[in-house]
Image (spheres, rainbow, N blue to C red):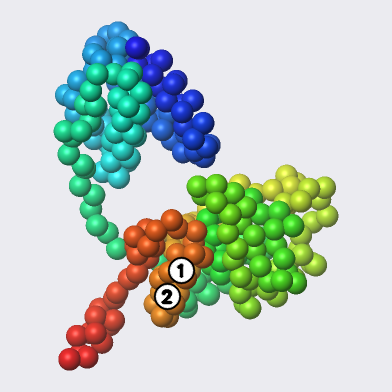
Amino acid sequence: MLLHMAIEKYKQYLITMDKSTETIKGYMSDLSSFEYFLERKHNCPLYIDEIETVDIEDYLYWLKEEKALKSASRSRNLYTLRSFWKYTHNKGLCDKNITISLEPIRLPKKERTYLSVQETEEFIEGISHPLIRVVAQTLYYTGMRISECLSLKLKNVDLEGEIIHVVNGKGKKDRKIPISKNLLPIFEDYLHSLRPNVDNDNFFATGKTGGLSAAYVNRVLQDTAIELGWKKHVTAHILRHSFASNLIKNGVNLVHVQKLLGHSNLKVTSVYTHANIDDLSKSINVL
């Protein structure tokens, strides 16, 4: 079977398994890049059984040297290829899984950026765009992903019950997030004074388009950081990260943080734990 045909079958499989649109888009982008590389290398379309481990190794080298992709991006590409070959081998579309012998790409372990409570207050105060300020406050006080936040409908926000209903979040999972006592008056003021009278049910709406894009929100956040003279790169995800990190820093149970963030396991949530030199000093002086 030609590689292109196998990729199409894999796409159908992902759709059948209810993978998210973004996940499918990412996998197809990686596989399209791989197919382009192979056709350029061999000067012809390839059957899947003609592809060898060395082709994947050459591809990963090309991503590093020619495309200048960082280790995280190359690791994601390798994960996509592993998933693709596992599928094609299990379905009998190829004779062997050539990705088994490939070693994982080592990822540098970096301390993730987050804002302290004081930094967050200063940052939000510095946002001049009224609507984006409310979005930023929502991200920080709920820990929602930007896609979840901007997908909220009016019916998803229950001010009386003080609950936000996240519908069809990552992994197509629903969850409930209590509305913080800090966020409740912000929502009430937004709905009564700031939200325009538009003919749609988006919770975060503008008079011009009726909605907001993640790209626009992140651009305003980055501009705010520049205006404040900060070197920190602040995005919507940094606000989500700050929400989780500050909860954990203040002693909130990791399992509770996991539930609020919508993570499937604690290992994912644990990346939001931080320890600065003062924390370490206090710990070592317990003895």
**Along the line of sight, the residue nearer the viewer: 92 or 20:** 92
The N terminus, quarter of image: top left
Position of residue 282 measured from the top left corner of the image (x, y, whole percent): 26, 87
Amino acid, disc 2: Asn
Q: Residue at x 20, y 47 (%)?
A: 106
Give the quadrant of residue 28.
Answer: top left
Q: Residues within 10 Å of mark 2 (few under 14, many from 20)?
A: few
On-image quarter of the C terminus: bottom left
Judge by depth and name the residue closer to the eye, 155 or 42. Answer: 155
Q: Secondary structure at mark 1?
A: helix
Q: Quadrant of residue 181?
A: bottom right
Tell me the SS state at disc 2.
loop
* Amino acid on which disc 1 is placed: Val
Residue at the farthest top position: 44
Residue 72 in the image: x percent, y percent? 30, 45
Tell me residue 87's x, y (percent).
35, 28
| Residue at 70% across, 75% down | 185
> Which residue occupies 29% across, 81% down?
279
Residue 61 versus residue 261 in the image, above or below: above
Residue 129 vertical placement versus 16 (above, below):
below
User: How many numbered badges does the structure rendering display?
Assistant: 2
Residue 252 vs residue 188: left or right?
left
Residue assigned mark 2:
253
Residue 209 vs 68, above or below: the answer is below
Q: Does residue 244 appear in the picture of this structure?
A: no
Neighbours of disc 1 within 10 Å: few (<14), some (14-19), many (20+): many
The residue to which callout 1 is attached is: 257
Q: Is residue 46 left or right of residue 170?
A: left
